[in-house]
Image (spheres, grey):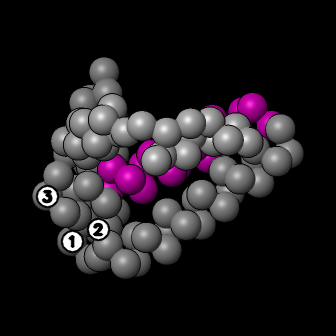
Amino acid sequence: MLEQLEQGVIDWAFEKGIIEHSDAISQFKKMDEEVDEYYEALMDDKPDEIKLELGDVFVTAIIHAKLHGLSAAECIEAALNKITKRTGKMEDGVFVKD
């Protein structure tokens, strides 16, 4: 299911010309905008908006992966391999690595 959704995002990004006419820096700015919108929805405690805005963050991350020739699965796997080896502790609701 996730692979189909990822492909849907990539197809959309090609249709809109994002893959051919954009770059990682421009898309980083878009991702930052989407993260801000997610934060606003989170602070307003609006579950429907949280879902939508978090989805937009995922969309921008998938586009970033594609711009770098990567799949979302490759990126998640690399991150998971990195974080599973970490040690640390919870502080103020956040895991802080050693």
Q: Residue furthest top?
A: 1
Mark 1 / mark 3, whichever is N-terminal = 1
Is 48 part of what is drawn in magenta? yes
Left or right of 83 in this view: 93: right
Mark 2 / mark 3, whichever is N-terminal = 2
In the rendered image, is residue 13 in sight?
no
How far apart, in angstroms, are the residues tagged by discs 2 and 3?
16 Å
**Main structural element of the magenta stretch: helix, strand or loop?**
helix
How far apart, in angstroms, are the residues tagged by discs 1 and 2?
5 Å
Residue at the image point whose x is 62% and y is 36% from the top: 90
Q: Which mark is residue 82?
A: none
Q: Residue 49 versus residue 16: which sits nearer the camera?
A: 49
Q: Position of residue 49 (x, y in %)?
A: 71, 40
Residue 95: image quadrant is top right
- Circle 1/circle 2 CB separation < 8 Å: yes
* Crowd band around label 2 with a 10 angstrom C-alpha radius: few (<14), some (14–19), many (20+): few
Residue at the image point whose x is 32% and y is 27% from the top: 2
Name the residue beneath numbered marker 1.
20
Residue 89 lies, with reference to residue 98, above or below; the image says above
Disc 2 versus disc 3: nearer the observer? 3
Residue 76 lies, with reference to residue 16, above or below; the image says above
Quadrant, the N terminus: top left
Q: Residue furthest right?
A: 44
- Amino acid type, mark 3: Gly
Name the residue beneath numbered marker 3.
69
Q: Position of residue 10 (x, y in %)?
A: 27, 49
Q: Position of residue 87 (x, y in %)?
A: 42, 37
Residues shaded magenta: 46-63
Left or right of 93 in this view: 24: left
Name the residue beneath numbered marker 2.
17
How far apart, in angstroms, are the residues tagged by discs 1 and 3?
13 Å
SS under mark 3: loop
